[in-house]
Image (spheres, grey):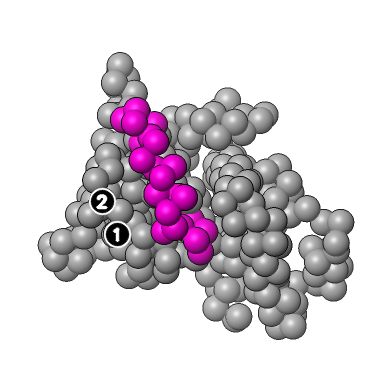
Amino acid sequence: MSKNERITKILQNITAVDDWRLLAAICGYPNDAQFEESTSFSKAEVLEKTIKDNYKSIVSNMLGECEYCDILMDVAKRLEVHNLLKLFHSEVDYEILEKQVIGKYIERLKLRTIESKGYKAWLQLEKDALINVKKAYERELLSEYEYYEITSPTYDFVDKMMTGRMDGFVMYLLICGLIDFENMLDACRKLRYLEIDPWLVTTIAAPSIFTNPIIDDIRKLKDKNDARWEVAIETVVFLSILALKQKYAETLAEL
């Protein structure tokens, strides 16, 4: 696999309109009529260039072509992912690191949710996340062993996510309960109208995303590079989630 083939494949396999809209909003790409009316191939080309240009604005001394593996690796470092892979030989290598990135992002989501809304709010999110898991079990898409392991009181799925070894199908089910994508898109659009560094789209994808404490946190990001890094993190996380969605599309269609 070439160093850029991964991102090209993910982008070209996007089919849902809201996925295009949310990715464009995260990247800071104007949600104009021209983008809405363009073909999927054109959207993929435009957003790949936007993602790479955003990254190049952070790494000002970068020489040569911007490659997706570099963006993924640097975002992983920024999120303090441990045991980083040094080389990418196959899709599996990308998948493992992408899942670790998602795991670290979910850990951050957990800490910020607890800080802003309390531990009970996080427990409710965990409860919501298990609804899809139960539904998959009832449809016989998960084994009895898998279901009872995941729903066990001692099972820390955030910790399991961060290893990068959690089953991708289960991981996607949990993510859909933890992240409110519809609210995230709404918040991304609203943030454009605030007097905030235009590089910053959003910093947290919880149901409480557009609350005053979060906006106050955003206003504290006075360093332009901090804001740009947040865009890079959100972008890679969402691309990684889309990769899971695409990989398990047939199974998810049975839910």
The magenta segment is 205-227
Q: Quadrant of the C terminus?
A: bottom right
Question: Which kind of residue does numbered mark 1 sit on?
Answer: Lys
Secondary structure found at label 1: helix
Residue assigned mark 1: 190
Question: Which kind of residue does numbered mark 2 sit on?
Answer: Leu
Residue drawn at x 41%, y 39% is: 230
Secondary structure found at label 2: loop
Residue drawn at x 79%, y 63% is: 150
- Vertical placement of 143 versus 21: above or below? below
Location of residue 155 by image quarter: bottom right
On the image, the x and y values in percent for residue 246 come to 49, 63
On the image, the x and y values in percent for residue 73 come to 50, 31
- Vertical placement of 137 versus 164: above or below? below
Would you call the spot at circle 2 few (<14 residues within 10 Å), some (14-19), or many (20 or more)?
Answer: few
Q: Is residue 218 magenta?
A: yes
Would you call the spot at circle 1 few (<14 residues within 10 Å), some (14-19), or many (20 or more)?
Answer: few
Q: Nearer the viewer, residue 143 or 212?
A: 212
On the image, the x and y values in percent for residue 129 come to 65, 67
- Vertical placement of 150 versus 69: above or below? below
Residue assigned mark 2: 194
Q: Nearer the viewer, residue 70 or 149?
A: 149
Are circles 1 and 2 on residues that touch, CB within 8 Å?
yes
Tell how many labels.
Answer: 2
The answer to whether one can see residue 238 in this image is no
The answer to whether one can see residue 64 in this image is yes
Residue drawn at x 34%, y 23% is: 59
How far apart marks 1 and 2 lie (CA) works out to 7 Å
